[in-house]
Image (cartoon, rainbow, N blue to C red):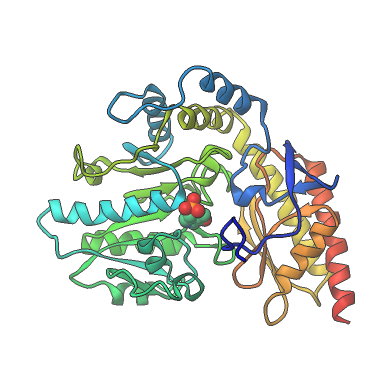
Amino acid sequence: MIAAVMPTYARYDVTLERGEGVHAFATDGRRFLDFGAGIAVASLGHCHPHLVKALQDQAATLWHVSNLYHIPGQERLAERLAANSFADTVFFNNSGGEAVEMGFKMMRKFHAENGDAARFRIISVEGAFHGRSLACIASGRQEKHTAGFGPLTDGFDQVAFDNLNEMRAAVGPETAGIVVEPVQGEGGIRPMSAEYLKGLRAICDEFGLLLMFDEVQCGIGRTGKLYAHEWSGVTPDILASAKGLGGGFPLGATLATARVAEAMNAGSHGSTFGGNPLAMAVGNAVLDVILETGFLDHVTEMAHRLGDGLEALVAKHPGVLEGTRGMGLMQGLKCKGDGGENGELVGLAMAGGLLSVPAGDNVVRLVPPLIIEAADVDAALAILDDACASLAAEAA
Ligand SMILES: *Cc1c(COP(=O)(O)O)cnc(C)c1O
């Protein structure tokens, strides 16, 4: 008999019932230091008092109205995102996949409105993850996500990671744009160099293409800037944001420049729930904290401590770990071996009281709440140290 909850997930044998700051508590009494944060979602930890209050106040005022009417929270959040980014305008949706999908639609619409409807193809890079809709899996092109869901939606191409020659060669008369994650998440915490992102921008400018950044995972302060691409000095035309933006409330956003968004008009896109008052109250509360003076400096400070500690672990456990990679509080530990060792390490760390998340390329992903303190970083490193020692002992 099939479970009532459709079995599309391989779940750990744990039920988390309560969260407080950087900790999550299980029904069996265990307490975990949560360096998974619901996969980079609980950016301010669990039950942050400012977020709880914002949600409770809004819940007692107005939950939902249609986008047939003005929603002041949208105007406020959009203005704040625009004021603090490359963007001029923002569309609100409910998830990362939706934010990406809308970006794809905007790329096509831009060219169509500019008399070049033949440009509809979008190029991504290997290791990409852009979500689970039909267009998103066609763009991500990972076998485990596309198997059985064919034929793949037309209009998506993929080239090697960090290879500008291949990217250039892939551009054709039908190409509408390029999409990349400035730091690949699911693909294994792989940051893209500033040179590479600059090269992508140059290719887009040369051929009249649009550049889209999928910052669903690496955005909203995770790397120590509001958006990760800011480190490179390169700006996109479109950006997909979600995960940390809602701090745990389902919220996505598609940001764009005026030039691109002017192709959209009343009726060309919509969402029933997108940007509803509850989501906007929480999104604005998240920005209250992240945009506070000094908050992102704290992220960078913690990131250095975590990064240095992870480097030390690699030096100490050369039989188990191959290296570290990442930016800010989006860090990966690459395991040695043929694959699956990352899952073992995640399991061992969990037994030691630390939640982390496996990523592609045999990487253990660490994406803690941005509010972590030095003691939390040290505690996580100590648990990982023990987990590595256990893994080494098992392998011996
Ligand atoms: C998680 C993720 C998505 C998909 O987000 P959903 O909210 O699950 O639809 C898309 N792109 C990136 C980079 C992600 O990490």
Q: Can residue 229 be seen in this view?
A: no
Residue 258 percent coordinates (x, y): 25, 40
Q: Nearer the viewer, residue 123 or 355?
A: 355
- Residue extending farthest to the left is 115
Quadrant in which residue 323 is drawn: bottom right
The count of marks equals 0
Which quadrant is home to the C terminus? bottom right
Closer to the camera in the image, 97 or 293 = 97
Which residue is pictured at 62% across the width and 60% down the height? 3
The image shows residue 130 at horizontal and vertical percentages of: 44, 60
Q: Depth check: give the residue in front, 92 or 301.
A: 92
Q: Is 297 drawn above or below residue 186 in the view shown?
A: above
Residue 300, by quadrant, is top right
Q: At x 65% / y 64%, what residue is drawn? A: 10
Q: Quadrant of the N terminus?
A: bottom right
Q: Residue at x 36, y 77 (%)?
A: 166
Residue 389 screen position, x and y as percent:
88, 68
Residue 114 point in image, percent of width and height: 12, 53
Residue furthest to the front: 1
- Can residue 97 be seen in the rendering of this structure? yes
7 shown above or below 284: below
Quadrant for residue 43, please give it.
Answer: top right
Q: In this view, does 109 lie to the left or right of 335?
A: left
Q: In this view, does 44 lie above or below 121?
A: above
Q: In this view, does 118 lie to the left or right of 358?
A: left
